[in-house]
Image (cartoon, grey):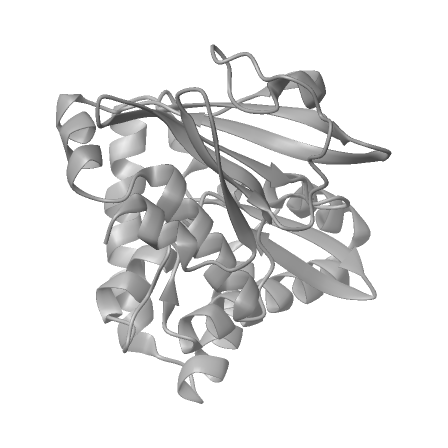
């Protein structure tokens, strides 16, 4: 399937071209009389203000900004993707790029009832058949903050608040897996949360998020290990056990000791490697 075919399947996106750029915009955007776009920057870059860089991996640049179109202003995140290696550059010639996969996964999650950023603009530069400079502009999820922030918050509010938070997170991850969806990188920084009567969670960086016919056990374990790498003294071993108990009750109907054993074994290896690389301290070990 070509890039255009992959994006054309999403009926909410409209195909557009300007200069060397090929891009898609959400059908809700009003683009009449928005002015000329400089071909050296992404489409509609002149409509972005208040850009603030956000920490991201070496393979991307991310900033928070405000998108102004007609009389409407929207808080957004702009993500520009870089090739990770020469091999990655070649693979982008043979398959859908990371930006396109992220758009498809975000859309899939939303249609399955989960919360993820809505794509407003996505595209790439194309010259002589070569595609590069992939980018996305997605809505900012207002009111949400990272798990790191929320863990500190509920820890101050007491045991009951912390347990409600862990139960909400466990149920959401369980629902994701029960829908046969595996998140591509379920580390704490890629999950946002907010509390409005009850806990709500959103998934970010979904370029490797995938829905299976039947969720493989290895994918389930991978996500649980990634979550286990959330290291905070406010989360005790008992708290982690409670999370797994809620998760297993929803997925299996009872506690799955075999699954927990596999997750703990892999988590121990991951944490040990982090200690060796001096990315965390020995005192941070919880396992």
Q: Position of residue 96 (x, y in %)?
A: 27, 44
188 with respect to 210 (left or right):
right
Q: Position of residue 165 (x, y in %)?
A: 67, 61
- Residue 43: quarter of image: top right
245 with respect to 130 (left or right):
right
Residue closest to the eye, 266 or 50: 50
Residue closest to the eye, 14 or 259: 14
Instruction: Give the total of numbered labels.
Output: 0
Q: Do we see residue 6 in this rendering?
A: yes
Residue closest to the eye, 15 or 276: 15
Residue depicted at x 53% and y 50% = 13
Q: Position of residue 26 (x, y in %)?
A: 60, 47
Residue depicted at x 56% and y 60% = 239
Residue depicted at x 39% and y 29% = 124
Residue depicted at x 40% and y 51% = 7
Q: Position of residue 28 (x, y in %)?
A: 69, 50
Residue closest to the eye, 238 or 225: 225
199 with respect to 125 (left or right):
right
Q: Residue furthest bottom?
A: 253
Q: Which corner quadrant holds the N terminus? A: bottom left
Up the image or down, 113 lies above or below 229; here it is: below
Up the image or down, 80 lies above or below 27; here it is: above
């Amino acid at each position: 399937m070509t890039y255009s075919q992959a994006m054309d399947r999403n009926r909410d996106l409209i195909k557009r071209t300007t200069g060397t750029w090929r891009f898609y915009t959400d059908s809700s955007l009003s683009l009449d009389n928005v002015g000329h776009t400089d071909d050296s920057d992404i489409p509609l870059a002149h409509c972005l203000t208040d850009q603030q860089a956000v920490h991201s991996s070496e393979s991307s640049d991310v900033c928070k900004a405000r998108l102004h179109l007609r009389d409407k202003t929207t808080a957004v995140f702009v993500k520009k993707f870089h090739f990770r290696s020469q091999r990655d550059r070649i693979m982008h010639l043979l398959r859908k790029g990371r930006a396109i996969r992220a758009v498809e996964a975000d859309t899939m999650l939303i249609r399955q009832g989960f919360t993820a950023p809505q794509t407003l603009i996505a595209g790439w530069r194309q010259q002589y058949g070569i595609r590069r400079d992939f980018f996305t502009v997605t809505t900012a999820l207002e009111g949400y903050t990272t798990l790191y922030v929320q863990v500190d918050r509920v820890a101050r509010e007491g045991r009951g608040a912390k347990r409600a938070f862990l139960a909400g997170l466990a149920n959401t991850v369980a629902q994701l897996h029960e829908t046969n969806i595996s998140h591509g990188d379920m580390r704490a920084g890629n999950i946002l949360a907010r509390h409005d009567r009850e806990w709500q969670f959103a998934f970010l960086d979904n370029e490797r998020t995938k829905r299976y016919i039947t969720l493989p056990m290895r994918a389930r374990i991978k996500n649980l290990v990634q979550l286990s790498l959330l290291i905070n003294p406010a989360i005790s071993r008992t708290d982690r056990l409670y999370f797994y108990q809620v998760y297993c009750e929803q997925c299996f109907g009872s506690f799955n000791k075999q699954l927990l054993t596999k997750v703990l074994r892999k988590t121990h290896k991951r944490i040990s490697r982090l200690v060796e690389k001096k990315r965390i301290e020995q005192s941070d070990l919880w396992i």
